[in-house]
Image (cartoon, grey):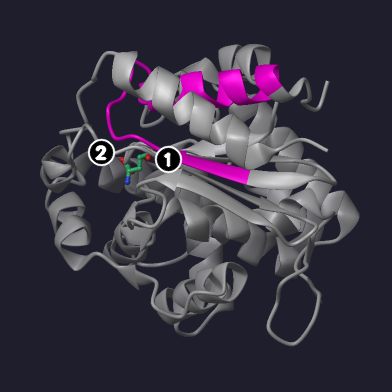
Amino acid sequence: MTDYQKVIDRIYHTVGPMWPQAKPADYIPALAQADPSSYGIAINTLGGDTFSVGDSHVPFSIQSISKVFTFAMVARHLGDRIWESVGREPSGNPFNSLVQLEYEHGRPRNPFINAGALVVTDRLIDLYPRPKEAILDFVRSLSGNPDIYFDTAIARSERATANRNMALAYLMKSFGNIHNDVETLIDVYCSQCAISMSCVDLARSFLFLANRGVNPLAPGGPERILTPSQAKRLGAVMLTCGFYDESGDFAFRVGLPGKSGVGGGIAAYMPGNLAIAVWCPGLNSYGNSLLGIETLERFTTDIGNSIF
Ligand code: GLU
């Protein structure tokens, strides 16, 4: 049996201190205040064990990791119909790029670039009368933590600088691929990105993906969130598109489906086995946590296991 605590302790104490510190995201001004020396790792296994080290209980801004949760909320209602409005190919462009959208008639390449996530959140607003409350309820139930909240200072800061996301939404609305008022959409989107969760919360919230779509730790007993086929598809899109323009390299180095956010978090999972989350706010040039990727690469290398 692998001693996961020993593995993450070793990575934390050897890699953490020697790894160069990188700069947190600053295009959303409030994110720049994150302490670049923060570092946490948490694991939840399907067997019910939790392992953690460092700042693993400290809540941070999950940013684009939220795109996995909103996608799951919409896919469970719309099923395959969601793929009529959003594709499932890597974009090869930065996460907030506008260019491809114009010549691809307002249908975003995948749900994890901003344009795709905006379409998903737009559908979520169609489906849920109180979308922000519904998102919070969903992550609270998945994580088992009723205290998860929106960091309103971060949401406000993003809202005040959301010109590109507004432009993406208006462009897609001109093609008929956004149904709701753009101001409302951006408000919900900035709130979902500003959800504060810890590595422990995130690892637990990703367990349903490791478990073919069933949350094993739901309060009333195991709860199906997605069908096995939907969970498979979401995992495939995470593997191919979950790490911006570095998704290929992440699959190459780490070998797990996952999703990163510009808050420096990464959540990933090993099907049938476990979910793992890492947080360190310093980012590389692709917008992924520098130490987070290194940690996960060492993790799958040390335990000699990945999806491949
Ligand atoms: N809220 C961020 C944005 O839309 C999310 C970016 C990210 O984490 O990829 O710019």
Above or below: residue 162 compared with residue 245: below
* 192 lies left or right of 307: left
Three-letter residue code for mark 1:
Asn
What is the three-letter code of the residue carrying label 2? Arg
* In magenta segment, residue 169: no
Q: Quadrant of ligand 1?
A: top left
Res. 306 image quadrant: top right
Give the image location of residue 274, x and y in percent.
73, 46
Q: Is residue 135 left or right of residue 88?
A: left
User: Looking at the picture, how far across and down is residue 113, in whole percent?
Assistant: 48, 35
Q: Is residue 272 left or right of residue 162?
A: right
* Farthest right residue in view: 228
- In three-dimensional space, the C-alpha distance between marks 2 and 1, rounded to whole angstroms, equals 9 Å
Task: Based on the picture, tell me whether residue 282 belongs to the magenta stretch.
Answer: yes
Pinpoint residue 254: horizontal percent, then vertical percent.
64, 20
Q: Which residue is mark 2?
A: 164
Q: Is residue 12 above or below residue 157?
A: above
Question: The residue tagged with tag 2: helix, strand or loop?
Answer: helix
Please name the residue that numbered disc 1 is placed on: 114
The residue at the point 64 percent across, 64 percent down is 74
Ligand 1 within 8 Å of the CB at mark 1: yes
- Residue 108 falls in image quadrant: top right
Q: Earlier in the sequence, mark 2 or mark 1?
A: 1
**248 left or right of 197 in image:** right
Give the crowd class for mark 2: few <14, some 14-19, many >=20 residues within 10 Å. Answer: some
Magenta extent? 276-302
- Ligand 1 neighbours mark 2 (CB distance < 8 Å): yes
Q: Nearer the viewer, residue 65 or 107?
A: 65
Task: Locate the C terminus and report the quarter of the image it occupies.
Answer: top right
- Of 27 and 171, the residue lying toward us: 27
